[in-house]
Image (tube, rainbow, N blue to C red):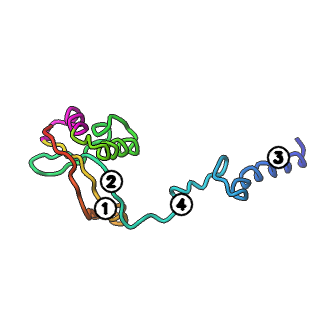
Amino acid sequence: MGARGRRIATGLVAAAVIAPAIRGVDSYPLSTYPMYASARAGQATFATAVGLTDGRRRRLPIRVIADTDDPLIASSRVRAAIDRGVADQLCAEIAGRAPAGVETIEIVSETHDTVDLVADRPSLIAREVHATCPA
């Protein structure tokens, strides 16, 4: 391939990369991932499950919460159980997978200040317990 061919190939690749932005389409090969590109709210509410040991809350691994390694799937399963009114059932399932030492499981919605959460500072604003069961 000569110099002219390389220039043509480079131009085609550049056009393919730029085309979605010009067309206003979020697709291959250029994706702006708009779900991550916009400003976040100052607060975020998460549906999750926590364990209690000697009255102290302990974060449970995602695998324990929803038998998955995907945090979005775990959160959606907890949120769906809360929304459907079956948080007690989910609580019992999680209790069956609870690690040693966990005495109680809580299904909760927690609202956090997003800046403090990311900065690893105390961030909890509100907490609602939807179900509690023994582990």
Label 1 to label 2, Cα distance in Å?
A: 8 Å
Residue at mark 3: 9
Residue contact at pointers 3 and 1, CB within 8 angstroms: no
Q: Earlier in the sequence, mark 1 or mark 2?
A: 2
Q: Earlier in the sequence, mark 2 or mark 3?
A: 3
Residue contact at pointers 1 and 2, CB within 8 angstroms: yes
Label 2 to label 4, Cα distance in Å?
A: 20 Å
In the rendered structure, which amino acid carries the disc numbered 2? Phe
Q: Earlier in the sequence, mark 4 or mark 3?
A: 3
User: Which SS class for mark 4?
Assistant: helix
Q: Is the residue marked by circle 4 packed among few (<14), some (14-19), or many (20+) residues within 10 Å?
A: few
Mark in the foreground, 2 or 4:
2
Q: Quadrant of the N terminus?
A: top right
Q: Is the residue marked by circle 1 packed among few (<14), some (14-19), or many (20+) residues within 10 Å?
A: many
In the rendered structure, which amino acid carries the disc numbered 1? His
Residue at mark 1: 112
Corner quadrant of residue 44 = bottom left
In the rendered structure, which amino acid carries the disc numbered 3? Ala
Q: Earlier in the sequence, mark 2 or mark 4?
A: 4
Magenta span of residues: 89-103
Badge number at residue 37: 4
Q: Residue at x 70, y 53 (%)?
A: 20
Label 3 to label 1, Cα distance in Å?
A: 49 Å
Label 2 to label 3, Cα distance in Å?
A: 47 Å
Q: Is the residue marked by circle 2 packed among few (<14), some (14-19), or many (20+) residues within 10 Å?
A: some
User: Which SS class for mark 1?
Assistant: strand
Label 4 to label 1, Cα distance in Å?
A: 20 Å
Badge number at residue 46: 2
Mark in the foreground, 2 or 3:
2
| Residue 126: x %, y % from top left | 25, 62
Label 4 to label 3, Cα distance in Å?
A: 30 Å
In the rendered structure, which amino acid carries the disc numbered 4? Ala
